[in-house]
Image (tube, rainbow, N blue to C red):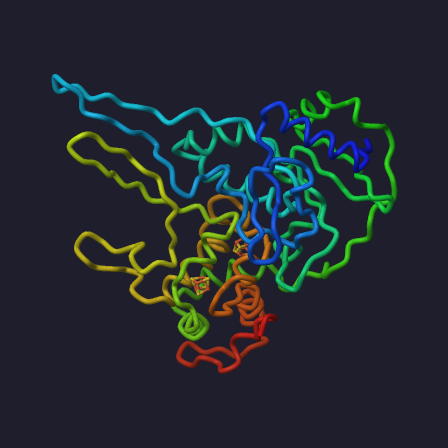
Amino acid sequence: MMLLTKDNLRTLINDLIKKGRPVIGPMGEGKDSCYKPIGSFDEINLVVPFPTKSSKEFFLADSEHILSYTFEEGNKVSVKEPPEPKEMVLFGLRPCEAASYPIMDKVFGWDYKDEFYLKRREKNIIITVACESADEFCFCTSVNISPKTTEGSDIQLTKTTAGNYNVNVITPKGRSLASEYEKLLTTGNEDIVDFNGPKQKQFDISRIKPWLAQNFEHPMWHKIALPCIGCGVCTYLCPTCHCFDITDEGNLKGGSRCKNWDACQFAMFTVHASGHNPRDTQSKRFRQRVQHKFNYYPDKFERTLCVGCGRCIRHCPADMSLLNTLITIDKLANNEIPSTKHQTPNNLQAPNPKT
Ligand code: SF4
Ligand code: SF4
């Protein structure tokens, strides 16, 4: 194990920036917190519980031109490819957030290889900081992740009681960065800060998938989704939601093909050219989100499409709680809530901790 003092961490980050390698870090406070390119170490806010937006936009841009073209004289068309992505260092991510990238890798590297995502994955380095605390919306342990999981991290730092960081180098990319800065690292480790937050699992994940597979038409879906206004905030903030749409925009001089985030919670998401919409109510759209994350994706890739970061609960304007939905499903699966095909129990949704 190696150790990095707080002063040496500042030196490392500032040196990367000085050498022209963009460093992305958590900035701001409360709802305004986000990941952004930083100008110096002192701009980072490592005590922010959770940046509102996840860091996925640095791998899957919210909107990007994937090619552009111009019409030239003589009926010629000139096509311009997008620039190659720059190597970035993403610093200060929570472990659950980094764990979302191996999950998305499976989607973007499966049958069709999405080079826009994969090139950034290849180039970017992720340095996580193990969690010191969790709030009432976090449920990583319930989806078999821990506050110090190393999945998706190239290097993980753990804060010590002396204010320094134990360094765990995980991947070859992490090793290469650590050897570049070996003068800043010392051998040894220190006592770590105690984790402060709920560690217990809040539902039994093994009961969720079988129940979802058998209860597509359960009356719960209608009742539980009633408050949802279909704003899509949950999907845009989620580190594992990855749907996008491709549009062509052009005029007589040229145009571009654009890749934009999309969301299964939008009413237009599944509208056919005929006008028919197979998911024509919000409850069907909410059901799709839960089924995709905890039934369809695990069918294909044998794990959940959720890391339990709690963002979709913290920021839902309608106080919908995915955690409470999963607790409810667990209780239904375990016969702790009576359920019949034609009756919807009145006490289906436990209150959201925010309310
Ligand atoms: S669950 Fe909440 S955040 Fe998601 S679409 Fe519905 S209202 Fe918006
Ligand atoms: S579904 Fe919610 S809790 Fe799960 S990863 Fe997405 S935002 Fe986080």
Above/below status of 99 relative to 343 = above
Front position in the image: 212 or 354 = 354
Name the image quarter holding residue 25.
Answer: top right
**In this image, 24 relative to 159: left or right?**
left
| 222 shown above or below 211 | below
Left or right position of 36 against 283: right
Judged left or right of residue 201, residue 120 is: left
Residue at (31, 24) in percent of width and height:
80
Of 208 and 131, the residue lying toward us: 131
Task: Count up the numbered dots.
Answer: 0
**Residue at 63% across / 58% down in the picture?**
139
Q: Residue furthest top?
A: 74
Residue 228 location (% of width, % of height) = 42, 68
Ligand 1 lies in quarter: bottom left
Residue plotted at (54% across, 52% down): 306
Q: Which residue is outermost to the left?
A: 74
In the rendered image, the vertical position of residue 186 relative to residue 32, given as above or below: above
Q: Position of residue 17 (x, y in %)?
A: 62, 29
Residue 46 drawn at (x, y percent): 69, 47
Q: Quadrant of the C terminus?
A: bottom right
Taking depth in this image into account, of 327 and 189 the one nearest to the observer is 189
Which of these two is toward me, 169 or 17?
A: 17
Residue 10, given in percent of the width and then of the height, sits at 73, 34
- Direction from residue 232 to residue 193 in the image, left or right: right
Q: Quadrant of residue 327?
A: bottom right
For the N terminus, the image quarter is: top right
